[in-house]
Each structure stands twice: as C-alpha cells, then as structure tokens.
Amino acid sequence: MKRRQFLQNTIPAAILPSLVDGFSVKVLGDNPIMSAMLNSYIETDRAMVIIQLNGGNDGLNMVIPLDQYSNYFNARTNIVIAQNRVLPLAGTNAVGLHPSMTGLQSLYNDGKMRLVQAVGYPNPNFSHFRATDIWMSASNSNQELTTGWGGRYLSDQYPNYPVGYPNTSMPDPLGIQIGSTTSLTFQGPSVNMGISITSATNFYNLINGIQDPAPNTPAGDALKYVRLVAQQSNQYATRIVAAANAVPTQGTYPTNNTLADQLKIVARLLKGGLKTRVYMVSMGGFDTHSLQTNTDTSTGTHATLMQRLSDAIKAFQDDLQGLGVADRVMGMTFSEFGRRVKSNASVGTDHGAAAPLFVFGNKVNPGITGVNPTIPANATVNDNIPMQYDFRSVYATLLQNWFCVDNTTLQTIMLQNFQQLGLCANGTCLDPTGVPNINNSGISLISNYPNPFTESTTISFTTQGGHTLVQVIDALGRVIKTPVDRDYTQGNYRINFESYGMPTGVYYLRFQNGSTQQVKPMLKVR
C-alpha cells in the first residue's frame, strides 16, 4: 500500500492523529460548547477533571437511601447492602455510601466532596451509545449535536483553534483525554479541541522516549512514516514530556487500578505546569446486568468497582494536596445512566434513568444537593429513579462558578438556561450564597390532593417568583406532561390537573423554581 493511500484510507483528515513514540494524539475540534468556552478568553490556572463511569452505574447501591431502607431492601433482596455495613456520612442519617468507598467517605467527611442526587435529563435514553452522546454533547434526548459541551467551551476561550496554536499564551493542549480516543465531549464547531493519550503505558513510553515497534511489513513502513511526520510537527508532545519530567516523585496510588493510573498522570501534568483546562479519564465495567454481587452482597463486581473508584479519587486528591496544586482542581464523576430500582433475577440491575454523581476538590461547596429519591413500597421492573437535577445544570454551574464564564457566553455553550446548583465554595467566581442549599426535607414546595386520584387532582406549589416549572414524570423517567412552565410572582398557587389518557400507576411531580427543586410521588388509581 502506498503511503498516500495508507493515510487517505485509514485516517480521516479532520481528525488526523499524531503518533509520537507510540503515543496516539488526536486533535479535538468540532465542539460548539468547547468553541464557546474558548472565544471569550479568561485567564485562569484552574482545571476540571471529568471521570466517566462507562456502562451505567448502579447509583442505589453506591449511595444507599437509609431513610427508606425497608423499601430499598424489598426492591433488591438479592443485592441489597446490609444496613449495618453502610458507611455513614457526617451530618446526615438519611444516606450512606457503599462499604467499599472508605476513600470517598473520608473526602466527604473532610469537606472536600459534594453529592448531587438523582442527576439525569427529561425522557432518558437507555442505549449506552446514545445516552453517552447526550451527556457529552449536552443535548436534549431528541436532539443530535455534533459538538460537545467541553469543545464549545474551549472554542469560545481559544478562538480559531488550531490555527496559531500552540502559542506563548497557550502553549499546552486545551483538553486531554487519557484512555481510548478523544470523545465527543471535546468536539468543537470545526475541530476537536483536545488530544488523547491512549493509555498509561503510552504516556510513560512518550516521556521515556520509548517507541512501540512497528511491524516489518508495508503497513509497518507506512506507520513509521506517519510517526516521522508527526514527530516533526507535534509541539504538544514536547510540552507534555517537559511537564512530566518536572515532577520526579508523587504520592502513593493503588495498584491494579486503571483509573488510579490515569489520575496519577493527570496530577503529574498539573504539577508540571500544563495550562490544560479540561482532563477526561474513564473506567469501565459498570453494565452490571448479572452477578453484580456475591452471596455477601457487600462484595462482588460492583463492590470492586466502587472500591477502585473511591481509592483512585482519594489517592488523586491526596497527591494533588502533596504536590501543592489541589486548590486548582475540581473533579466530577458521571455515568451515562443509572440502573432500575428493582434488581433482576440474575443478581443484577438493568438500564435505568437518573443516578447520583460526585463533585470533589478543595474548593467544592461540601454537602448534599437534593434528597434521596422516593423508593416505591412495591417496586416493579419498570420503576426508575426520577430526575431531580438536569446533568447540564452541573456543567453550567462548574463553567460559571469554576471557570468564571459569564452568563451570556454560558448560554452559547449550553444552548439553554440551566439552574445553578451552588457546587463551588465561596471565593471562586460567583459565590453560592445566593443559591439556596435546600435539601427539601420537611419543606413542602409541591403536592397534590387527592392522592391517590382517579382522573383529576389539584396541584399546589409555592414559588419564590420568576420562572417556575412543574413536570409530570412516569416510572420510566419520561416527561408525560408539563402543566406549569412560566414566570410567576412570589406566592402559593393551585392548578387543576387532568390525567385523561394516562394509565394507572406511580407518577412523579417535579417542581423547579430557580435553583430550587423538589420531586414528589403521586398515584393514579382506577
């Protein structure tokens, strides 16, 4: 095969990777969110680290609802975590962590973590691929975008990329993903805004000058040629090597833990001085349809995943602290969806809707956002965790409060106006003092009467004024009706709700008013 044919047939020109000493680098570019992030440049040394949990994590066995333990137990008798094994969290008796997550328990109790309950989006998609695209692009479930939220942000902050980059003000990669190839998250309006380090092994090969051998074949000759061209032009590789070599020693990380291996690299590059804004790492194995636990339900596949996640984040945070860069970094976890409320007969859980996530770092506003989701007394295989918070509110909050993106630019990046959640501590960009930290326990913002009801019921809600939203969500997490979606003056309101055409069953009223939300169940009967 001729070299030109090799290039044309194997590597699309728009995403041509550079192969440097066996290190695969892909330029990330066509992401509107990343692009929007780059065009209004804001000087900052802050970084965000995104941890993707591939496969759909079981949030109910990660964050256990102790205040509804009997219903949780009845829904999951074959995988339930024993109540006396659940790890307690400081300041709350309502919720605890999986017994394998001692590292994250320590971070939470030290005020370096925030738990956000029931994160999802309206009308969830249960396909791994489509759901992942939705999270990475920050699109509606019925909308397909070719750009990622990170790419739109970076494109806004660094206009015209890649033309003129690297330069003296931004000599480093804009975004770095470790593992696999660069994702849709970094895709900008015209190019991908990040680079990809395919594995920890390739990273250390790069900084040690080791090149994976090319086969002694025509294709191997072509690969050598591609590497030569890439080595001559790739200035980012030099910066990465210099940053890595500036940090000879680091803290201790757990072994046999691929997430820890990736986070160790991120910490090294941060300390080494890279100005990279966004890092993305991942771990797989969360598609736990069967054999999720052993006979001792605190052990097994999911327990191992929880321990590796927890241990890796704790080691990473400790390392950042020891390296003196912890104040620069905010981290978050996400999975493309959660799992169903009721376990299946295969000692596992099936694809679900909303799930909790963690935001962590020295500058996090610690605590819990939201409350435990309602667990039905007689859960069925169709019951899902109803959404409390849109995942795009998490992105929007971190962009505005951590990266100091102004409100106008934020709308360009996120494409809509999403509520702020107060995830960052005072003294970042926007103080969370104006964001009510309401867990809604004991405070009724929305209700309906009668409940249960047959055909009609009266919905009552209390708004502080401004835009107010009331959605009716079914057991699968789909928005069935939106009886309220407009601005109100402050006060108490009542509306009549007609349920014609809706089958009997459990539904959820979701109320949102500014940064405040609440979800309440309601039951339609014959």
Image (spheres, helix red, strand yellow):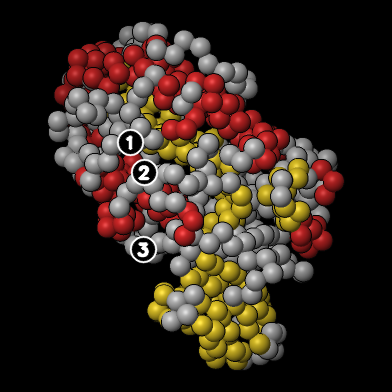
Residue at figure coordinates x 33%, y 36% from the top left: 44
Q: Secondary structure at mark 2?
A: loop
Q: Earlier in the sequence, mark 1 or mark 3?
A: 1
Task: Check whether the beta carbons of the residues at disc 1 and disc 3 lie within 8 A of each other.
Answer: no
Q: Secondary structure at mark 3?
A: loop
Where does residue 305 sit, x and y in percent of width and height? 64, 36
C-alpha gap between disc 1 and disc 3: 24 Å
Where does residue 171 sit, x and y in percent of width and height? 24, 25
Q: Earlier in the sequence, mark 2 or mark 1?
A: 1
Q: Using the rendered view, name the quadrant where residue 6 is placed.
A: top left
Q: Is residue 434 above or below residue 367?
A: below
Where does residue 94 sit, x and y in percent of width and height? 74, 56
Q: Is residue 142 above or below residue 86?
A: below
| Residue assigned mark 3 | 417
Q: How many marks?
A: 3
| Residue assigned mark 1 | 44
- Quadrant including the N terminus: top left
| Residue assigned mark 2 | 403
Q: Earlier in the sequence, mark 3 or mark 2?
A: 2
